[in-house]
Amino acid sequence: MIALVRFVLFSIALLFINLSQAQDQPVYPKVAGYFSVVHVLVTASKDETTTNFSPAYTVGFPTGVNILKSDHIAFSFEITPFVKVENNSSKMSNLLFHPGIVFRRRNGFAITERLAFESSGRFGVTTVFTKVLKRYKSSNSFIAFPLPIRAGNDKPVTFGIGVQVGLSF
């Protein structure tokens, strides 16, 4: 009888361990969205180097959807409208379509490789380094550092450095 009780208790314990592990494991594929604000701080070409705050100010609003395939990889669709403020006037200056692959690392780090297609006629690639700052119950705040490279539209190739902050959900 004692052996039967031990067997039943052991079986129940194993069941609870398996159930708790199953709940901790995320189910893939999984969809996550985000909204952020990006400032390209410096842009350089062979001809010149410009900063974002002189003579005009440009801000972008990246909005996207990530399809998480596993703990390590995701596909991302991002659209970024840019607003330019110059001479006390503001207008939407560019729309960026920015699909990419997210390589998720430990501790909230990620490296994203994106293609870039701009309504201004420019195109290129962007490498983005991202770090989750704080995890909340149903969202995360993050900071990212995009490194855009652009060509096309009869302009020289440019390289930029930016900072992006946002919320994923």
Image (cartoon, rainbow, N blue to C red):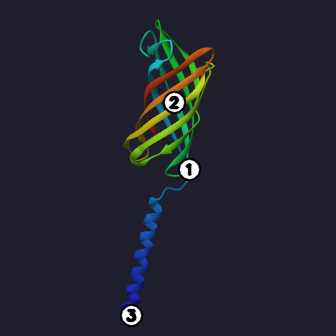
Q: Is residue 9 above or below residue 136?
A: below
Based on the displayed image, in which of its 4 quarters is residue 65 positioned? top right
* Residue type (three-letter) at the residue carrying disc 1: Lys
Amino acid at circle 2: Pro
Disc nearest the viewer among 2 and 3? 2
- Please give the residue where the numbered disc 3 appears in the rendered image: 1
Q: Quadrant of residue 141?
A: top left
Identify the image quadrant of the N terminus.
bottom left
Residue closest to the eye, 2 or 103: 103
- Marks 2 and 3 close (CB-CB < 8 Å): no
Q: CA distance from mark 2 to mark 1?
A: 21 Å
Q: Which mark is residue 62?
A: 2
Question: How dense is the environment of label 3, judged by Cα within 10 Å: few (below 14), some, or many (20 and up)?
Answer: few
Q: Please name the residue that numbered disc 1 is placed on.
A: 69
116 in relation to 13, above or below = above
Marks 2 and 3, how far apart at CA: 65 Å
Is 128 displayed left or right of 133 in the figure? Answer: right
The mark closer to the camera, 2 or 1, is 1
Determine the secondary structure under disc 1. Answer: loop
